Amino acid sequence: MFENYRDKKIIAVIGGRDTSPEIYQQAEEVGRLIAESGNILINGGRTGIMEASSKGAHLAKGLTIGILPGKRKDGANKWVDVVLTTGIGLARNAIIVNSCDAAIAIDGRYGTLSEIAYCFQFDKPVCSLSSWNIEGVTSVSNPEEAVNFALESCE
């Protein structure tokens, strides 16, 4: 009945709750590519980049996991398959990053920056697609490069 997900990679898509239509499309494409690779997408489960990447993965028949900051499941966007509530606010960013094998930062502000910092703390590879330009973060120029980076870096 259930597929065994133990051998799948979990790719975090981290980014802000507000974004432009162009960046939204890039995030949706990233989600689609993660699903088509047969792997799992994890994110904060809400709006913006989180919604876009979840939508792309869900429509491509992939598994999406949303780690919410609050205690209510109804805070998740409609594209999240597995909704996990934490009740710990932005501290949930540590859970997202610690649960992934690699991360893709798209757009975002200080919450995204905190997730990038957690990537360094937890020794998780992270790339930036239209996000922060920081030493130690690999810059990529399109969704394909982002997903290739994530999958290759966690092999």
Image (cartoon, rainbow, N blue to C red):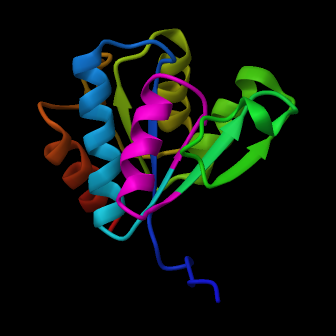
Query: Is 48 contained in the magenta span?
Result: yes
Is residue 75 positioned above or below 82 on the image? Answer: above
What residue lies at 26% left-to-right and 30% top-to-bottom?
25
- Residue at 22% x, 19% y: name it: 22
Is residue 3 within the magenta segment?
Answer: no
Q: Quadrant of the N terminus?
A: bottom right
Residue 66 location, x and y as percent?
63, 44
Q: Position of residue 102 (x, y in %)?
A: 41, 50
Residue 133 can be seen, yes or no: no
For the record, the magenta segment spans 42-63
Left or right, 43 with reference to 83? left
- Where residue 108 appears, as percent x and y from the top left, is 42, 16
Determine whether 11 is above or below 66 in the image: below
Task: Say left or right for 102 vs 131.
Answer: right
Q: Which residue lies furthest to the bottom in this view?
A: 1
Res. 5 visible in picture: yes
Report x, y in % for residue 146. 23, 43
Total number of numbered labels? Answer: 0
Where residue 153 sits, quadrant-wise, is: bottom left
- Residue at 57 percent across and 84 percent down: it is 4
| Picture layout, residue 5 above or below residue 57 | below
Q: Quadrant of the C terminus?
A: bottom left
Residue 69 appears left or right of 109: right
Residue under the point 60% across and 29% down: 46
